[in-house]
Each structure stands twice: as structure tokens, then as C-alpha cells.
Image (spheres, rainbow, N blue to C red):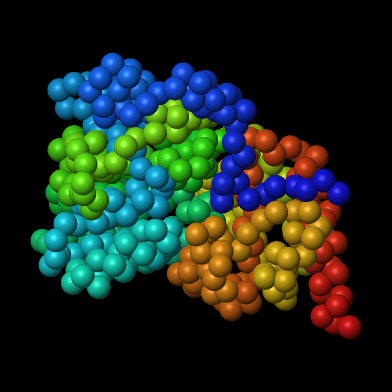
């Protein structure tokens, strides 16, 4: 049976146009953009063209007077670490994150806690939406940064980022949003969101692995966390890859040029969920009571062990996950679902399915058939 890939939240296949643009870049032979000679100047011009294009596509301000910054990183994890650690600065101080953030945000917050920062975790409701109404009561005079993701990577639940940003603006506190799972699936405009910093990465939208960006508002009080170079104003030193920057630029251009994609992904997700709900008993759509991004479906199949089901589906040719790819080696239940107050049976039977531009209706229908068969097989073995 041909394999069916339903794990686009982990990473997306490299788009052919992106690969061609990167190959053309390599053929051009761009060298070190930090070099002063003509070879370096040529590389620098191409790099800055990609940087300016990415800034514009993400809704950052590009006018010379108060331009926002785009810092290239190795991906979303590094960008999130740079945002949290760089905006927090030196202890003592106070940081606020939500209980459902990506491990790269929660891990950075835990690191700050070990360094002497106080950390508050904003709770979420049972649908997985952050309780932003509680945010003003948590902000203190020494709060250095607040972080709230745009789209939850496990449930696809949309978060009230604009409301949180406005609250932080009123308190004059820097606000960061991890928009990794939103860019390419929803319209994302940095200026309109009102954030101080925004994270995006290329490999979630048909781009290459190994490159992401941290978008910074003009005047953001970011401190460097890496040292030993002057690149990118010293805020993220190290030689930038022109090829990877062009790959991310091309991937962004491609997804933004296809405004019909979100609606198509939503149709696929709804078709997928309706088919499974109609054929299987005891299926729960986690986050189904909230507004969700169109590409993610988190389902609990009560009475079925999630780890056993992932293996069974892999053998059946359906790729999915138990949660974030960055935590896939852990056997612990989802911290996101736990924060939502999910019961133990829901936690232990939850899987994430995620769709991309390459996913087709026949693939969704075939995946549903394989999932139903695999679950019925597991349930029959358990009862026998």
C-alpha cells in the first residue's frame, strides 16, 4: 500500500520550486556574505533581498525610519530560545508563558527559572484556549516577557494573540508569539498582531530544514545569547546561509500566493473527522469546541493505547504522531491535553493528524479506512 503522510505539523515535504530555487542559488556559488570583497558583497545583496522579502511577507515594517528586524536562525527552536532568553535578559525578573507552549518555549522558561527568574504559566480552558482575561493579574512590575503561541501545534487551537499583545502593550511588557504552526496556513501579519517578536520556520511550509526567523519590532530590547560575531547586529552572530534564506523566501512566496489553501485544508480536516466519527465509537476531537487552524486534527480513540496505535498505523502506511515532534521520544502523555484537563483515557489514546498542500481527498479517504481497520483490530485483540 502506498504510504500516506499525515504528519505535516512535524515537517512538510520540500516543495519542488523551493528545491529548484535553492539549487539555482548553489549553482550561482554565493560565498560568505560577511566578506568585504565583491564575492561577499554579491552574497550580501542576495541575502538582504531574501530578508526584506520575508519581512514584507510576514507583515513586518520595512520603511527605513522604524524598520522591524528579521533575524535568521537555525529554526523555530532557536528562534523561540532567542526570544525568551534574549527578552528576559539577566535575573532577577519575571516571565509569563502558557501551559500549552511548544517544548522550545517551555524549556527556555524552565531554564530561566533555574537562573533565578520567577515564571508564571497562564492556564487554558477545557477547549485549549489561553485564559487571556487572567493575564493582567499576572503581569508584574518586573515582568520581562510574555509568550503565547499563535496556533497550538498539537490541537490546532487558535490562541487570542492580538488580545494578549494589547494587554502587554498597555503594561509596556514585550510580547512574543510562536507562529510556527500559523504561518502558511493562516494570514499572519506581524504589525497587525502587535507582537514584539514572532517566530517562524521554513520546514513547516514546504521550505528547507535548518532555517527560521525571529521577527523583532523596532527597538525591541533583545540581548544576544550567542557571541563571537557581528552578523545580524550581533544579536544572532554566525555566517548566514544564502541558500537557506532563499529557500525560506521562496516557500513563503509560494504559500502566500495560494490563498485558497486554508479553505481546502479545512475541508480535508472536516472530511477526515466526520468519516472517523461516523465509523468509530468513542472518538473525541480534542479542541473541537474552539476555533482551530485548518490543518490539524487531534483525536482520542478511547480504549486504544496511543503508542500501539501509532505503530499499527505506521505498519498500515499512515504516518501520524502522538504530539510535538520535538517530544516524540517521550512516552509521557501530552502536556497540552493535560493542561486542558483531559481525563486519563483521553490522554492515553490521543493522536495528532496534520494535513498539507500535497494531501489529497483520496489519501484522506484511504487513511480513514486504514485507521478504522487498525483500531478495530486493536480493540478485537484486547477483548479476545
Q: Is residue 293 above or below residue 322?
A: above
The residue at the point 70 percent across, 47 percent down is 5
Q: Is residue 127 visible?
A: no
Position of residue 336 in the picture relative to residue 141 (left or right) = right
Q: Write down the quadrant of residue 264 in the picture.
A: top right
Q: Is residue 297 above or below residue 375?
A: above
In the depicted view, which residue is nearer to us: 88 or 29?
29
Q: Write down the quadrant of residue 267 in the picture.
A: top right
Q: Picture coordinates of residue 105 (x, y %)?
A: 36, 58
The residue at the point 23 percent across, 62 percent down is 95
The residue at the point 26 percent across, 29 percent down is 34
> Outermost residue, left direction?
141
Position of residue 240 in the picture relative to residue 21 (left or right) = left
> Outermost residue, bottom direction?
384
Q: Is residue 112 visible?
A: yes
Q: Picture coordinates of residue 368 (x, y %)?
A: 79, 52
Quadrant of the image containing the C terminus = bottom right
In the depicted view, which residue is nearer to us: 329 or 4?
329
Position of residue 46 in the picture relative to residue 260 (left or right) = left
Q: In this view, does 178 lie above or below 23?
A: below
Q: Picture coordinates of residue 269 (x, y %)?
A: 66, 46
In the depicted view, which residue is nearer to us: 94 or 130?
94
The residue at the point 64 percent across, 62 percent down is 351
Q: Picture coordinates of residue 186 (x, y %)?
A: 49, 37
Q: Write down the quadrant of residue 145 in the picture.
A: bottom left
Q: Is residue 171 above or below residue 182?
A: below
Amino acid at each position: 500500500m502506498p504510504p500516506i503522510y499525515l504528519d505535516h505539523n512535524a515537517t512538510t515535504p520540500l516543495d519542488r520550486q523551493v528545491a529548484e530555487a535553492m539549487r539555482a542559488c548553489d549553482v550561482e556559488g554565493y560565498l560568505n556574505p560577511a566578506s568585504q570583497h565583491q564575492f561577499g558583497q554579491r552574497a550580501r545583496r542576495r541575502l538582504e533581498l531574501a530578508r526584506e522579502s520575508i519581512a514584507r511577507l510576514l507583515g513586518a515594517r520595512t520603511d527605513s525610519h522604524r524598520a522591524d528586524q528579521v533575524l535568521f536562525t537555525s529554526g523555530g527552536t532557536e528562534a523561540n530560545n532567542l526570544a525568551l532568553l534574549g527578552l528576559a535578559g539577566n535575573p532577577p525578573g519575571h516571565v509569563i508563558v502558557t501551559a500549552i507552549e511548544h517544548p522550545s518555549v517551555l524549556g527556555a522558561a524552565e531554564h530561566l527559572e533555574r537562573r533565578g527568574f520567577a515564571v508564571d504559566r497562564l492556564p487554558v480552558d477545557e477547549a485549549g484556549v489561553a485564559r487571556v482575561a487572567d493575564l493582567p493579574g499576572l503581569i508584574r512590575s518586573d515582568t520581562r516577557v510574555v509568550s503565547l503561541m499563535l496556533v497550538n501545534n498539537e490541537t490546532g487551537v487558535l490562541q487570542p494573540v492580538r488580545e494578549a499583545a494589547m494587554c502587554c502593550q498597555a503594561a509596556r511588557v514585550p510580547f512574543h508569539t510562536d507562529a510556527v504552526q500559523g504561518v502558511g496556513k493562516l494570514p499572519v501579519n506581524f504589525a497587525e498582531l502587535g507582537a514584539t517578536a514572532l517566530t517562524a520556520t521554513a520546514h513547516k511550509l514546504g521550505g528547507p530544514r535548518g532555517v527560521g526567523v525571529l521577527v523583532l519590532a523596532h527597538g525591541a530590547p533583545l540581548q544576544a545569547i550567542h557571541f563571537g560575531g557581528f552578523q545580524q547586529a550581533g544579536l544572532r552572530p554566525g555566517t548566514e546561509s544564502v541558500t537557506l534564506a532563499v529557500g525560506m523566501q521562496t516557500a513563503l512566496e509560494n504559500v502566500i500566493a495560494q490563498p485558497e489553501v486554508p479553505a481546502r485544508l479545512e475541508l480535508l480536516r472536516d472530511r477526515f473527522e466526520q468519516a472517523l466519527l461516523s465509523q468509530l465509537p468513542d472518538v473525541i476531537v480534542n479542541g473541537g469546541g474552539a476555533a482551530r487552524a485548518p490543518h490539524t486534527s487531534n483525536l482520542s480513540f478511547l480504549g486504544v493505547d496511543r503508542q500501539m496505535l501509532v505503530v499499527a498505523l505506521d505498519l498500515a502506511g499512515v504516518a501520524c504522531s502522538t504530539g510535538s515532534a520535538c517530544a516524540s521520544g517521550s512516552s509521557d502523555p501530552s502536556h497540552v491535553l493535560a493542561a486542558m484537563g483531559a481525563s486519563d483515557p483521553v490522554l492515553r489514546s490521543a493522536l495528532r493528524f496534520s494535513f498539507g498542500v500535497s494531501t489529497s481527498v483520496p489519501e484522506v479517504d484511504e487513511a480513514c479506512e486504514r485507521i478504522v481497520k487498525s483500531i478495530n483490530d486493536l480493540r478485537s485483540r484486547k477483548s479476545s
